[in-house]
Amino acid sequence: MEEQEKSAQNFLTFRLGDEKFAANLDKALNILEMLPITKVPQSPEYMKGVINRRGEIIPIIDIRMKFGMEPIVVSKRTVIIIFRVEIQGETADVGAMVDEPGTVIEVSEADITPPPSIGAKYKSELVKGMLKVDNDFIMLLEIDKVFSLDELVEINQNKETAERGK
Amino acid sequence: MGNYIDFIIYLIVLLGSIPLVRMLLLLFFKKSVLKNIGFIFYLIIVFAAILGRISANTGTVHLLWQAPLTAVLLTAAFIYVDRINLAPVRRVKHELDKIKTGDFSESNKFVFSRQSTQTEIAEMYEAMQEMKTKIGSVLSEISELSASIFQTGEDISKEAQNITHLAKEQSASISEVYLAIKEVANLIAENTDKADKAEKIAKKSTVKIEVSNKNVKKAMDSLQDIAKKVNVIGEISFRTKILSLNADIEAAKAGENGKGFQVVAAEIRKLSEHSRAASEVVEKISQESINMALRTGRIAEQVVPDIKETSDLVKEIYSGNKEQNVQAELIKSSVHLIDNTSHKFTDLSLIMSDKTAYLSDFSTKMMNEISFFSFISQQNLTDNSENIIQNPLSFSPKSIYITVSHYLKSNSFKMIKNNELKTKTNG
């Protein structure tokens, strides 16, 4: 919270398909190389399964599908970024599969612009703004919203041996 | 009276001896003129004997007219003999005189008196007449033949000239062919050498290509090794990057205290990015190299059988050439033989030309000789030699001679003469 007040913020970038996205660095917990994902039956398509991280069960989401892209195809560069999201006061650790990890960038407040309201490619509530980096625009994601409540409920339910599908 | 009886007996004996003498003369002289002459003289002797007897009986006074009478009788006898028995001799002489001048034309047959036809002279005349007719026909035939010999000689001469010309042309062509064949044989021999060399080269290149193929395969293996190693490097750099990102995340959580660490993490990340980029380039290049090596290998593999096939083909060409060489040598020697033969043929045709010229000369001379004789040919009035004799009615060796001398002046004959001269000067 203290960092937000500063003129510059750190962001973690990654690639989904051909597009670059960014998330607040403090939302990221960890980056993992691809590892075996245990599939969960009767879960939605974008829900790839769960992994075990130091004894903790973490659901893995294909966020490409959240943006209406084709389902992810695992490659050498595919990584899982673990985010700690806050949904209605509750925190949860969620893993997002991305095509390639980017880097950590420092962007000043001035270079963050609000998202274009008309003709947005993706759901506007998921895009927090645009980062202007070297004449290039990177979509800054509202990570908390990307993993919506419904899903998390699902996730939680799935965690406790899922019985109900959507 | 006794005298009369004696005289009558004497007369009977004398007259009776006449047929005896006739018989004897016929027996001894047969067809001789003497037979007739002798008989006439005997008759005169008998007459003289009778006259003598008469004068002996009557007295010598009668001898005064006896001698002139005998003389007259003798003269008459000689005239008779001359006219009747020796006439054929004069005819023979006349005919011989004609023959002497070469005149064999038929004259009217002389009809002799009965007495003379029984003599040898008459027979001689008839035989001579027959001989003259025969010689005349033979001469006319010879004349015709010599005319046709001349004509044939002319034709042969022309043909011989043609043959000489053709033989010369042929000889020239064959010489050219011989030269060409020689050239061809040389070229074939050269080709054989070249094919031999090409085969050796093809064999060498097959070996070299096989070696290079092996080398390419080795290079490919090495490249694949490199690619694997580079892959490992890429993986390591990727992992390093993730590590640096995690470090960054941790540093961010540490707040102000993590600032320094964040810088280090960023540096590590940069390095990992560099190494990743470098490894990607290397990977790309090595992949390209592998592809290239693969392609090269494939091409080389394709080339090897091609070269082997080429080598085999060249081998076949070589053996084919060798065979061709043998055949060409055979042709060469055959053509050489033909060349020699044609040269000989040219020589022979020249000789023939020469000889025909002689033949023409001879036939001309012969006609010249025959023209001395004159005769009328009955058979040849309808002969087919009109091209020589313009007026068949005036056929005679002289007319032929005129025609021949006309030929002599013509160009064709001159050419023969020239050829003759040339061959003589060449010879």
Image (tube, helix red, strand yellow):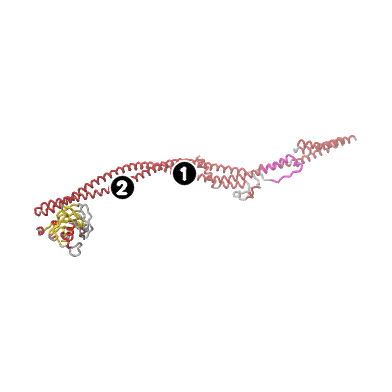
Q: Is residue B128 magenta?
A: yes
- Is residue B92 at least partly visible in the picture? no
Q: Position of residue B147 (x, y in %)?
A: 60, 45
Chain under disc 1: B
Query: Do we see residue A39 in this rendering?
Result: yes
- Residue drawn at x 68%, y 45% as measured from the top left: B106
Q: Is residue B320 above or below residue A3?
A: above
Disc 2: which residue: B298
**What is the x, y in percent for residue B70?**
81, 38
Check if mark 2 and mark 1 are on a common chain. Answer: yes
Is residue B9 found left or right of B78 in the rendered image? right
User: Is residue B71 rendered to the left or right of residue A58?
Assistant: right
* Alpha carbons under labels 2 and 1: distance apart: 56 Å
Q: Position of residue B230 (x, y in %)?
A: 21, 48
- Decide which of A65, B177 is in the foreground and name it: A65
In this view, the mark in front (2 or 1): 2
Q: Earlier in the sequence, mark 2 or mark 1?
A: 1
Q: To which quarter of the image does residue B69 belong?
A: top right
Could you classify mark 2 by the number of other residues whose Cα lies within 10 Å: few (under 14), some (14-19), or many (20 or more)?
A: few
State yes or no: residue B65 in magenta.
Answer: no
- Magenta segment's dominant SS is helix
Q: Chain of mark 2?
A: B
Depth order, front residue of B10/B246:
B246
SS type, badge 1: helix
Q: Which residue is mark 1?
A: B174
**Which quarter shows the N terminus of chain B?**
top right
Q: Position of residue A69 (x, y in %)?
A: 22, 59
Asked if disc 2 and disc 1 are in contact, CB closer than 8 Å, the reply is no
Boundaries of the magenta span: B107-134
Q: Which residue type does callout 2 highlight?
A: Arg
